[in-house]
Image (cartoon, rainbow, N blue to C red):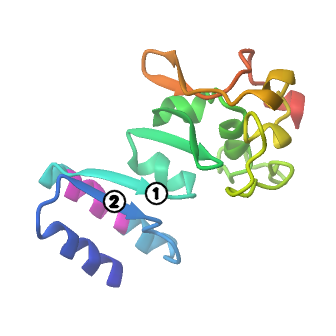
Amino acid sequence: MRQRVMIAMALLCRPKVLIADEPTTALDVTVQAQMLDLFKTLTNDFGTALVLITHDLGVVAGVADRMMVMYGGRCIEKGPTDTLFYDPRHPYTLGLLHSTPNVDKRAARLDPIQGLPPSLEHLPRGCAFHPRCAFRFDRCFEERPPLLPVEDVREKACWYQGELNYEEVA
């Protein structure tokens, strides 16, 4: 109820952009669904853009038109949500999707991304994800990849240009 009141207060000024940082944390599934429906209604009715900051990919899939994936404090992939979910182009995005429960796949266990995230104070040289990446090669250790267009509607920051096949690295 407090979160709903905060959203109502935020919308009183009819903002052009509403930033919601982990808005569904600690909510049960029913209340979470109600909150997401409320966001959809409010953004449609008020014409307000919603910037949703979350670790919950299920929330992103249900609400967002576009998605930006961050790692080590940088954007590493962005584009239409459906495209990133069904055809990720960055190894971290691929790992995130395979480490998230999926009712369609009913896996016996989840496949976590190996290793630990880096300290933002001491990022590794080159690509911040290289210590955990199964697709890394020499250039990844030395040069930080810029965010570059992959197609007309998406971008990625990764030197690897081949196909991302999860079965090869799992």
Count of picture labels = 2
Residue type at numbered disc 1: Ile
Residue on which the image places disc 2: 19
Q: In terms of depth relative to the viewer, which is nearer, 6 or 138?
A: 138
Residue 107 percent location from the top left of the image: 79, 49
Q: Is residue 10 left or right of residue 78?
A: left
N-terminal-most mark, 2 or 1: 2
Identify the secondary structure beneath mark 1: strand
The image shows residue 145, relative to residue 70, as above or below, that is above
Determine the image quadrant of residue 152: top left
Q: In terms of depth relative to the viewer, which is nearer, 119 or 163?
A: 119
Identify the secondary structure beneath mark 2: strand
Q: Is residue 54 left or right of residue 106?
A: left
Quarter holding the N terminus is bottom left
Q: Is residue 53 left or right of residue 109?
A: left
Residue type at numbered disc 2: Ile
* Magenta stretch: dominant secondary structure: helix
Residue 160 percent location from the top left of the image: 74, 20
Q: Are marks 2 and 1 in contact (CB under 8 Å)?
A: yes
Can residue 25 be seen in the rendering of this structure? yes
Structural crowding at the residue carrying mark 1, measured as other residues with C-alpha within 10 Å and reported as few (<14), some (14–19) or many (≥20) = some
The image shows residue 98, relative to residue 24, as above or below, that is above
Can residue 1 be seen in the rendering of this structure? no
Residue 125 percent location from the top left of the image: 77, 38
The image shows residue 9, relative to residue 82, as above or below, that is below
Q: Which mark is residue 53?
A: 1
Q: Which residues are magenta?
A: 35-43
On whether residue 38 falls in the magenta region, the answer is: yes
Residue located at (71% from left, 15% from top): 161
Residue 7 percent location from the top left of the image: 26, 71
Structural crowding at the residue carrying mark 2, measured as other residues with C-alpha within 10 Å and reported as few (<14), some (14–19) or many (≥20) = some
On whether residue 102 falls in the magenta region, the answer is: no
